[in-house]
Image (spheres, rainbow, N blue to C red):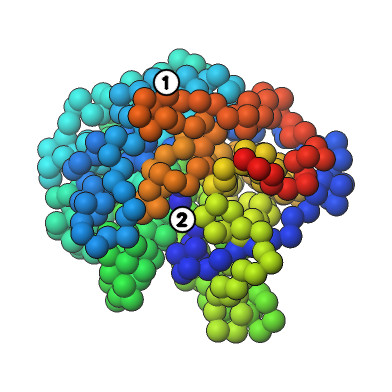
Amino acid sequence: MSHSGFETCAVRYCPAVATADDKGLRGGASFPTGFVWGTATSSHQIEGGNVNNDWWVWEHTEGSPCTESSGDACDSWERWPEDVELVAKMGLGAYRFSLEWSRIEPAEGEFSIAALDHYRRQAAACRERGILPVVTLHHYTVPRWFAARGGFEWTEAASRFGRFVERTTAHLGDLVGMVCTLNEPNVMALLGYLMGRFPPARSGDFEAHGRVVEHLIACHHAAVEALRAGPGDFPVGISLSMTEFYAEPGGEAMCAAGREFMEDIWLRELTGDDFVGVQGYTRARMGPEGPIEETDGLQLTQMGYEYWPGVAEHTVRRAVEVTGLPIYVTESGIGTTDDRERVRYMTEALYGLRRCLDDGIDLRGYFAWSLLDNFEWDDGFWPTFGLHAVDRTTFERRPKPSAAWFGQVARMGHVPPLTKATAAGPGRG
């Protein structure tokens, strides 16, 4: 998953959720033919054994906030055919997965044909099953050699990332269906250089943060150039973490500052993209002094976020307002031990997206996070965002009721109304 922007600032979120009856959706919500329904994963969170990247080092560094190591994760480096089959069984039209840079370029300038062939087989398997392969080129991790050079502080970061993208595109470009260059670079920069939760574990280093943001934007542009110069014909964009900045009395200025810092400096750079991927999990309540952390009386999710499915609608509207580009919701979901709550959250989020379509917004798809319960970065394996549970010993994938529900939504193009039991809120998991 992506850590939602101001979750990183230790904000605790909470909502008031509208039911179907409140919004005139008693019959549910239908979506147009051609709307893309998918689910998402990332390489480090599911593959296992990614020992050559900076996160593996971070997980094994004394004093890091990581609760446990990714270890074997979901063993998806070996079991990826099972994962593609899960997507097919649900009847989804797209699968978003990421490429592990540290496997493809394990040493500077040394590319692994075997690793590239591995991802090519994965993309081909998707195509064979009628699934659109949606490839993310960078999802938080970098090779150890790149980190040793300074990571995204390195002045050559964009040229090296561009070279990686060029080589990868040459090998896979004829098979991919869509590409996200970077996953939530805004969160990676924040957590790595201001909050100390991600590598390289800086806290309050605003100067370095500014350089990293500049270099990540350059990486995105270098990737777009390399992708369009290679084989294949597919839309190219980026996936950004966004939130609903909600102003409590006196908090308007802080909301504006939060949007500028976390979102707008990125959104303004996307004029040449084919789409924007938005990823939001909750809202940030802002007062005159900044984020409001009080949670008394609020409904919280498993990770302490405010339950706020309306963030999907809000971020779509915000992204299109700034960019004017087509939009995909490239991640949306909830960490919960109660699968009824997951269905409720997704239902409410999709009602909001239907309203976006009704208002003429060019919204093209929705990807549920996540296909599997997986490694949630410094939080380890305890948060459960998956449509499928994974046995931590046998790696058996077990579909949750939400997987069948979401598959039916995708096949029918229709979100049914909430039942009384689901609309009543979470029960005992």
Around disc 2, counting alpha carbons within 10 Å, would you say few (fewer than 14), some (14 to 19), or many (20 or more)?
Answer: some
**Residue 358: x, y in percent?**
78, 46
Task: From the viewer's perspective, tell me whether residue 232 is left or right of residue 105.
Answer: right
**Residue at the extreme front of the image, as rendered:** 428
Q: Please give the residue where the numbered disc 2 appears in the rendered image.
A: 3
Residue at image position (69%, 66%) is 297
| Quarter holding residue 97 | top left
> Mark 2 or mark 1, which is nearer the start of the sequence?
2
Q: How many labels does the image show?
A: 2
Q: Which amino acid does label 1 sit on?
A: Glu
> From the viewer's perspective, is residue 17 above or below residue 246?
above
| Quarter holding residue 188 | bottom left
Mark 2: which secondary structure?
loop
The quadrant the C terminus occupies is top right
Task: From the viewer's perspective, tell me whether residue 203 is left or right of residue 110.
Answer: right
Q: Please give the residue where the numbered disc 1 appears in the rendered image.
A: 82
**Residue 335: x, y in percent?**
54, 47
**Residue 320: x, y in percent?**
61, 55
Q: What residue type is labelled 2?
A: His
| Quarter holding residue 296 | bottom right
Labels 1 and 2 touching (C-beta < 8 A): no
Q: Which of 90 and 356 is in front in this view?
A: 90
Q: Nearer the viewer, residue 38 or 334?
A: 334
Residue at image position (42%, 20%) is 82
Around disc 1, counting alpha carbons within 10 Å, would you say few (fewer than 14), some (14 to 19), or many (20 or more)?
Answer: few
Q: Which of 15 and 313 is in front in this view?
A: 15
> From the viewer's perspective, is residue 241 above or below residue 125?
below
Residue at image position (45%, 64%) is 8
